[in-house]
Amino acid sequence: MYHSWKKLIAMTGGRKFFIRKVHIPEDQIDIEGQFQLPPLAELNMDDQIFAAAFLKTHGSIKQMETIFGISYPTVKNRLNAIAGQIDIVDVEVNIKMPASNILDKLEQGEIDVSEALKEL
């Protein structure tokens, strides 16, 4: 499946495209129309792989650093760039600092446990 997807991306030159026909072989059903790809499928292949690795590591920035040989800020910047490309849900949150940022700072040694607890 990955190889056929890669060929499709190469054929379209990375341009946006729509699926016009879906075939379900087990039931011999064809569905025709104009189907937009899901938001994650519209990412370029490198970003899809990065997002998939992030999910597979259960969101571990440390593991992402190891897998891709990049720094913590690079992982965060890449994730922010990917998140900026997908428009799944538009949520506005008014929190001083999200718990994930506090835990990230703790993981990176920027703050100690007592500071993290105060922030949380």
Image (tube, rainbow, N blue to C red):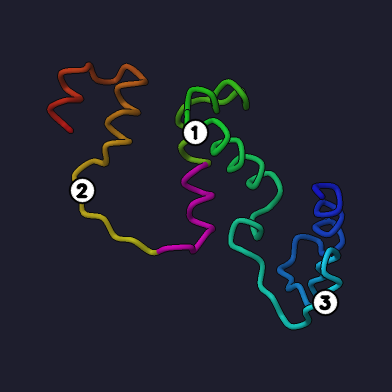
Residue under pointer 1: 58
> Callout 1 environment at 10 Å: few (<14), some (14 to 19), or many (20+)?
few
What residue lies at 80% left-to-right and 54% top-to-bottom? 5
Residue under pointer 2: 95
- Above or below, 16 relative to 112: below
User: Could you say which is closer to the camera, residue 69 or residue 88?
Assistant: 88
Residue under pointer 3: 30
What residue lies at 20% left-to-right and 48% top-to-bottom? 95
The percent coordinates of residue 56 (x first, y second) are: 58, 34
Distance CA(mark 1)–CA(mark 2):
23 Å
Q: Are marks 3 and 1 in contact (CB under 8 Å)?
A: no
Mark 3 vs mark 2: in front = 3
The percent coordinates of residue 19 (x first, y second) are: 76, 72
The disc label shown at residue 29, or none: none
> Callout 2 environment at 10 Å: few (<14), some (14 to 19), or many (20+)?
few
Question: In the image, is residue 92 part of the stretch drawn in magenta?
Answer: no
Tell me if 73 is positioned left or right of 30 in this view: left
- Above or below, 42 relative to 83: below
Q: Which is more N-terminal, label 2 or label 3?
A: 3
User: Could you say which is closer to the camera, residue 103 or residue 80?
Assistant: 103
